[in-house]
């Protein structure tokens, strides 16, 4: 079955290839979302706490970044500040090159509408609207109306694999499907940034993996910057970057784990060969004839790695079972 996201990426890769003059030095992509020295105090008087204690963060296009930390570590607060929903007590945020400090509420709202899509743990769909209407309403707010809105909303739903569910109401959709509608709503107006707060927390294994795979595909093929804040380890295999937050501070950045390492960590020992998809690395669009340039190369590598089938809980359980029966 042809995947519109993959196709779009193929077109984009061709374009990049055609437009890069021979012999030119490619410049690394500018970060699309930048936070500097972010501090956020919450509460008042004796109950006052510092939820974010001085965070620097940069997010780039075409990457899925995880902000990972335990409950109460300040993830939602930081996401809200980066998403211009909450203003920082100290520090600055810059969205697509525009510093947000000093902007009027109206300008800030416009900046948000034009550049940022949001996804929440609880989907936040309107129960009385069908899938298509739920996506359209977000476009309406962004000033996109009529036939154009319908076409864009339908395309976004197709992009998330729900081309057959336009008329379905949230009550008749599974959790995974509801979250896909929420993803479609977030990407329908083609924002450069998508911010997701615990998007897999309410989902079972299969749907959690499905939503993460989708977000990773969208980041890479539509060249969006996606930030997922989470404490769900199932998200690890999908990220380009994993930033760790603890007690309001960034404490480090890890390389995303290989499926094998994730399995080792999950069971506490090396469990031998981890089976991956036989189609690993077979990605026509990215493996095609793209003009050599560092960013493209780096992305190609990441995408190739990502074609490896993420380890499923079922695979892990099966491996553990086999090990036990051999013991
Ligand atoms: P996370 O999303 O990582 O679970 P949060 O950003 O929601 O963390 O919260 C960080 C800290 O700020 C927590 O200690 C939380 O209790 C506190 N907090 C969150 N919102 C408020 C608020 N409105 N008033 C006071 N404290 C808050
Ligand atoms: Mg939270």
Image: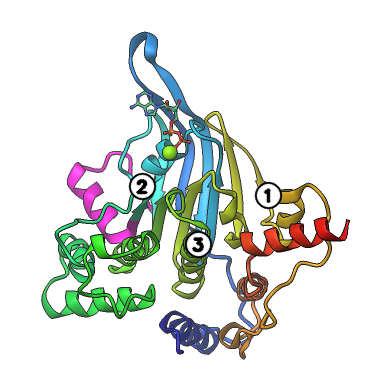
Magenta stretch: residue 114 in it?
A: yes
Task: Identify the secondary structure beneath mark 2.
Answer: loop
Q: What residue would you read off at disc 1?
A: 254
Residue depicted at 66% across the width and 76% down the height: 304
Classify residue 78 by image quadrant.
top left
Front-most of 294 and 206? 206
Q: Residue at x 50, y 46 (%)?
A: 230
How crowded is the residue under tag 1: few (<14 C-alpha within 10 Å), some, or many (20+)? few
State the colouring used for the structure image.
rainbow
- Please state the horizontal and vertical placement of residue 171, each as a whole percent of the image: 24, 60
- Asked if 167 appears above or below 66 in the picture, the reply is below
Q: Which residue is mark 3?
A: 212
Which segment is the magenta one? Answer: 98-117
Label 3: few (<14), some or many (≥20) within 10 Å? many
Q: CA distance from mark 2 to mark 1?
A: 23 Å
- What quarter of the picture does the C terminus occupy? bottom right
């Amino acid at each position: 079955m042809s995947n519109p996201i993959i196709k779009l990426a193929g077109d984009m890769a061709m374009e990049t290839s055609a437009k890069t003059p021979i012999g030119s030095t490619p410049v690394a992509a500018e970060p699309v979302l930048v936070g500097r020295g972010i501090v956020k105090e919450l509460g008042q008087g004796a109950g006052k706490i510092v939820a974010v204690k001085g965070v620097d963060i940069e997010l780039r296009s075409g990457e899925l970044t995880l902000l990972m930390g335990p409950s109460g570590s300040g993830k939602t607060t930081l996401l809200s500040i980066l998403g211009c929903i909450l203003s920082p007590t100290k520090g600055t945020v810059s969205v697509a090159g525009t510093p947000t400090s000093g902007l009027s509420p109206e300008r800030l709202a416009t900046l948000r509408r034009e550049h940022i899509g949001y996804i929440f743990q609880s989907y936040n769909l309107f129960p009385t609207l069908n899938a298509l209407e739920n996506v359209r309403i977000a476009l309406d707010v962004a000033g996109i109306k009529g036939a154009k809105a319908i076409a864009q909303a339908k395309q976004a739903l197709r992009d998330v694999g729900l081309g057959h569910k336009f008329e379905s109401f949230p009550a008749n959709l599974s959790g995974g499907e509801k979250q896909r509608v929420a993803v479609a709503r977030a990407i329908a107006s083609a924002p450069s940034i998508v911010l997701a707060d615990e998007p897999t927390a309410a989902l079972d294994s299969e749907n959690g993996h499905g939503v993460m795979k989708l977000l990773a595909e969208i980041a890479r093929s539509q060249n969006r910057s996606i930030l997922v804040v989470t404490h769900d380890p199932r998200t690890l295999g999908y990220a380009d970057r994993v930033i760790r937050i603890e007690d309001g501070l960034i404490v480090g950045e890890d390389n995303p784990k290989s499926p094998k390492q994730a399995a080792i960590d999950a069971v506490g020992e090396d469990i031998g060969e981890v089976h991956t998809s036989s189609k690993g690395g077979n990605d026509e669009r990215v493996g095609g004839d793209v003009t050599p340039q560092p960013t493209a190369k780096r992305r190609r590598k990441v995408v190739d790695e990502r074609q490896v089938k993420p380890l499923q809980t079922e695979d892990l359980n099966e491996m553990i079972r086999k090990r036990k029966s051999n013991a």
